[in-house]
Image: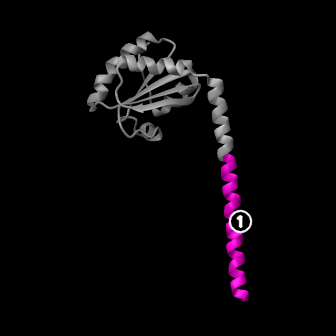
Amino acid sequence: MATTELTTAGFQQSLEDNEILLIDFWADWCGPCKQFAPVYEEVSEQHPDVTFGKVDTEAEQELAAAANITSIPTLMAFREKVLVFSQAGALNAEQLNEVITAVKGLDMEEVHRQIAEDEAEAAQNSEESDEESGEAAEGSEGSGEDSVRS
């Protein structure tokens, strides 16, 4: 399968439509990006069950910013709409194939379960933090009143 240019407008649809989506964030002026491009293209031909997207960070600055791209090339892998891999730097064909094999081998039930647990824990910590903030505010008000009454 050949690579596909992704844009801000079509990104969400590509994420929705593909079980596995690899994305190469690149720019024309980037030497390592130019070295990685033929490797990415070649490996894409070996994995017709994976969608290989490319994002030109110069043309799609909004998308690159939303993905928090700070150096290029950056490779991201999504499976079932979940970001499961993100790494800056060019890979050789063997390394790229290893990433793809690892992504394909993920137990996505376990990944989704872990995400749900992490979100529940974060929500609980947020609630506890809010409660502690409220108690601290009440405590400081109370101590201020005590000092005034003395």
Residue 40 in view of the camera: yes
In reply to whether residue 137 is colored magenta, the answer given is: yes
Identify the residue at image location x=41%, y=38%.
69
Question: In the displayed structure, would residue 77 be above or below residue 132?
Answer: above
Query: Which part of the image, by quadrant, shows the C terminus?
Result: bottom right
Q: How many numbered dots are placed on residues in this image?
A: 1
**Which of the pair 138/70 is nearer the observer?**
138
Report the side of 141 relative to 73 (left or right).
Answer: right
| Residue drawn at the location 49% of the way across and 32% of the way down | 9
The quarter of the image holding the N terminus is top left
Residue 64: percent from left, percent from top: 42, 37
Q: What amino acid is labelled 1 in the image?
A: Glu
Image-quadrant location for residue 96: top left
Q: Residue at x 69, y 75 (%)?
A: 141
Residue 39 drawn above or below residue 23: above
Residue 137 in the image, given as x and y percentages of width and height: 68, 69
Question: Is residue 16 depicted above or below 148 in this figure?
Answer: above
Q: Is residue 136 magenta?
A: yes
Main SS, magenta residues: helix
Where residue 26 appears, x then y in whole percent? 35, 30
Residue that badge 1 annotates? 135
- Residue 111 lies in quadrant: top right
Report x, y in % for residue 140: 67, 74
* Magenta region: 123-150
Q: Nearer the viewer, residue 118 or 60?
A: 118
- The image quarter containing residue 58 is top left
| Residue 51 appears in the figure | no
- Left or right: 58 as drawn, with respect to 83: left
Element under disc 1? helix
Residue 64 located left or right of residue 123: left
How would you rate the neighbour count of disc 1 (Cα within 10 Å): few for under 14, some for 14-19, many for 20 or more?
Answer: few
